[in-house]
């Protein structure tokens, strides 16, 4: 991400996020001396948000990086936690939806023959 992509709205969002983080630190850890800098950051966010552009560049760059990593980790976890066990259970019970066992055993096709006369209702509600 280059600095030209950072808008004033993104800088405002970064300033507000910094304000929120400081307020949460004050609330949960009792660091009341941080109230004055928190108010200063909020006033700066409302009056001169362009000050936060360098911080916004890093903040949004980190968010894009984490978004790419977390999505891959999450999808991998879902695959191994849900899809793999379902496939193993189906294999254990001998389910052969793709008819792989009958593949190339004879000269005929392994496609299922479906003799169905399609009507207008089939096109309106395909599922």
Image (cartoon, rainbow, N blue to C red):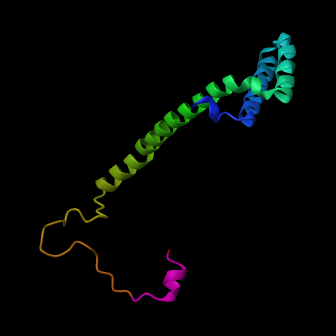
Q: Is residue 119 highlighted in magenta?
A: yes
- In screen coordinates, is 18 left or right of 33? left
In the displayed structure, 4 sits above or below 87; it is above
Q: Quadrant of residue 113?
A: bottom left
Image position of 118 (left or right of 62): left
In the picture as drawn, the residue positioned furthest to the top comes out as: 33
Reply yes or no: does residue 115 show up in magenta.
no
* Towards the viewer: 107 or 93: 107
Q: Splitting the image into 4 quarters, where does residue 23 fall?
A: top right
* 15 up-or-down from 108: above or below: above
- Does 47 appear above or below 84? above
Q: Residue at x 77, y 15 (%)?
A: 29
Residue 50: x and y, percent? 76, 27
Q: Position of residue 4 (x, y in %)?
A: 63, 33
The stretch of residues the image draws in magenta is: 117-126
Whole-percent x and y of residue 108? 16, 76
Q: What residue is drawn where x is 85% and y is 12%?
A: 32
Q: Position of residue 36 (x, y in %)?
A: 87, 14
As drawn, is 112 to the left or to the right of 104?
Answer: right
On the rendered structure, is 76 left or right of 60? left
Q: Nearer the viewer, residue 99 or 24?
A: 24
Counting labels gives 0
Q: Which residue is depicted at the point 76% across and 23% down?
A: 51
Q: Residue at x 72, y 29 (%)?
A: 14
Query: Which quadrant of the rendered structure holds the N terminus?
Result: top right
């Amino acid at each position: 991400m280059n600095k030209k992509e950072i808008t004033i709205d993104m800088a405002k969002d970064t300033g507000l996020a910094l304000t929120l983080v400081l307020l949460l630190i004050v609330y949960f850890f009792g660091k009341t001396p941080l109230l004055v800098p928190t108010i200063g950051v909020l006033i700066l966010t409302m009056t001169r948000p362009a000050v936060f552009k360098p911080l916004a560049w890093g903040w949004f760059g980190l968010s894009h990086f984490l978004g790419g990593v977390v999505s891959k980790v999450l999808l991998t976890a879902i695959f191994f936690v849900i899809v793999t066990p379902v496939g193993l259970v189906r294999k254990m019970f001998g389910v052969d939806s793709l008819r792989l066992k009958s593949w190339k055993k004879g000269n005929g096709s392994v496609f299922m023959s479906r003799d169905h006369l399609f009507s207008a209702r089939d096109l309106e509600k395909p599922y």
